[in-house]
């Protein structure tokens, strides 16, 4: 059987003034290192990639395609929703619930009764979690 001092202060240099265990039983070194590693991973933010599709409403149509994208904001197109983690649709800067639109690769369909007013900005955001 091992000496109880080894288990009580396995990592502490000054056994009587241990700041880690405050006089209690110190956990084994491997457990402390394992828990510290888990804590580091949990505090790391996720890495993501974002892409945006920008268009403006003509006041009549409710289906937007890659051809409707405003070219001076980039040419990403409407990405297949199965290849991204999340999508957000903003019409006139307001986040829309998913029940009001449907997505397919290259196509955004608005399920609303009326189309947006002419000149209304439409921004479709794609978010992919990479790690």
Image: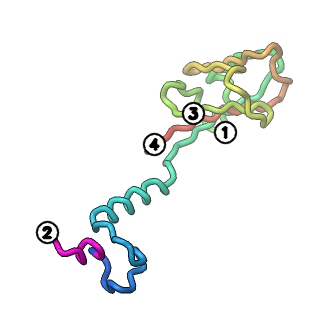
Instruction: Name the side, left or right, on which 28 lies relative to 87.
Output: left
The front one of 125 and 35 is 35
> How far across and how far down the image is residue 58, in percent?
80, 21
Whether tag 1 and tag 2 are in contact, CB under 8 A, the answer is no
What's the distance in space between the residues labelled 3 and 4, CA to CA?
A: 12 Å
Q: Which image quadrant is residue 105 in? A: top right
Foreground tag (1 vs 2):
2
10 Å neighbourhood of mark 2: few (<14), some, or many (≥20)?
few
Q: Residue at x 72, y 29 (%)?
A: 55
The front one of 6 and 102 is 6
In the image, is residue 3 part of the stretch drawn in magenta?
Answer: yes
Residue range corresponding to the magenta coloring: 1-9
Foreground tag (3 vs 1):
3
Q: Work out whether mark 4 precedes mark 1 in sequence or the reverse, and give the earlier one.
A: 1
Label number found at residue 86 = 3
Q: Which residue is mark 4?
A: 130
Q: Residue at x 55, y 27 (%)?
A: 79
Foreground tag (4 vs 2):
2
Q: Work out whether mark 3 precedes mark 1 in sequence or the reverse, and give the earlier one.
A: 1
The correct choice, above or below, for 8 with respect to 79 in the image is: below
Q: Residue at x 83, y 20 (%)?
A: 59
Q: Secondary structure at mark 1?
A: helix
Q: Work out whether mark 3 precedes mark 4 in sequence or the reverse, and give the earlier one.
A: 3
Label number found at residue 73 = 1
Q: Residue at x 13, y 69 (%)?
A: 1
Q: Which residue is mark 2?
A: 1
The front one of 18 and 124 is 18
10 Å neighbourhood of mark 1: few (<14), some, or many (≥20)?
few
């Amino acid at each position: 059987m091992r000496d109880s001092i080894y288990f009580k202060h396995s990592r502490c240099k000054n056994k009587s003034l241990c700041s880690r265990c405050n006089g209690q039983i110190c956990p084994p070194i491997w457990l402390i290192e394992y828990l510290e590693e888990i804590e580091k991973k949990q505090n790391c933010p996720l890495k993501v990639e974002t892409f945006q599709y920008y268009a403006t409403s003509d006041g009549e149509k409710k289906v937007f395609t890659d051809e409707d994208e405003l070219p001076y904001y980039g040419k990403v197109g409407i990405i297949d929703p199965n290849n991204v983690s999340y999508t957000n649709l903003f019409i006139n800067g307001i986040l829309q619930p998913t029940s009001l639109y449907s997505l397919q690769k290259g196509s955004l369909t608005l399920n609303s009764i009326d189309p947006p007013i002419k000149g209304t900005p439409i921004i479709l955001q794609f978010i992919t979690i990479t790690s």
